[in-house]
Amino acid sequence: MKAQQRDTLIDTLKARFERNMHRHTGVDWADVHGRLRNHPEKLRSLFEMETTGGEPDVIGVADDGGAYLFFDCASESPEGRRSLCYDAEALRSRKQNKPRDNAVDMAAAMGVSLLTETQYRELQKLGEFDMKTSSWVATPPEVRELGGALFCDRRYGKVFVYHNGAESYYAARGFRGSLSV
């Protein structure tokens, strides 16, 4: 990552942080910035989140002793991460009309984790997300072993969790990531 890209990213993150204080009550930007300086390897993941349309922001303190938790906070599922099936097995199973990638591997390449259902519900307490799109979420092994995968969205003022074949993909379905810094 070039110095100019890093500086632009940090400026973008700071501006978003300051515009959305309700997402991280009691968190000080100077502390977050200090963590970013001490963990520069995490900037690449945040850069990937940003450049694919995720609009990452701090949503609180992680449970691991002071790290800050970033979630994709774009109003809709990140545009650069849509039209993906769930995982590599699902991608291999498609015989025709294969999507370009899968959510699990793309998240891993970015250095982030798919939101869990619990994290997705926590995100929805901070605003209204995925009103027109949907997002794959980390799927329990027992569901995945049966060929399914879970996704979430918000409709009619409620958060819904659904299932689909893991090999399915839609132009309006992507994934949201989380990153602990």
Image: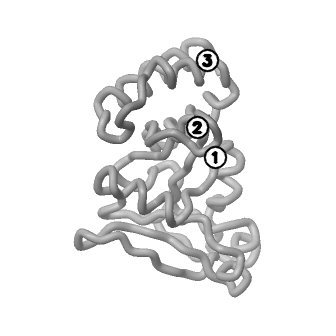
Q: Which residue is mark 1?
A: 112
Residue ID at (43%, 22%): 29
Q: Nearer the viewer, residue 120 or 105?
A: 120
Q: Which residue is mark 2?
A: 48
If you read the primary sequence from the N terminus, does the residue marked by circle 2 or circle 1 appear first? 2
Residue ID at (41%, 54%): 123
Which of label 3 and label 2 is nearer to you? 3
Query: Tags 2 and 1 in contact by the CB under 8 Å rule?
Result: yes
Q: Determine the CA span between mark 3 and mark 2.
A: 17 Å
How has the structure been colored for display?
A: one colour
Secondary element at tag 3 = helix
Counting from the top left corner in percent of width and height, residue 24 is at 38, 37
Q: Residues within 10 Å of mark 3 (few under 14, many from 20)?
A: few
Query: Tags 3 and 2 in contact by the CB under 8 Å rule?
Result: no
* Quadrant location of the C terminus in the rendered image: top right
* Quadrant location of the N terminus in the rendered image: top right
Instruction: In the rendered view, tell whether residue 35 sits above or below residue 130.
Output: above
Q: Which residue is mark 3?
A: 37
Q: Nearer the viewer, residue 91 or 144?
A: 144
Which amino acid type corresponds to the residue marked 2 in the rendered image?
A: Glu
Counting from the top left corner in percent of width and height, residue 180 is at 60, 40
Counting from the top left corner in percent of width and height, residue 124 is at 36, 58
Q: Residues within 10 Å of mark 2 (few under 14, many from 20)?
A: some
Which amino acid type corresponds to the residue marked 1 in the rendered image?
A: Val
Which amino acid type corresponds to the residue marked 3 in the rendered image?
A: Arg
Residue ID at (44%, 42%): 59
Counting from the top left corner in percent of width and height, residue 171 is at 45, 65
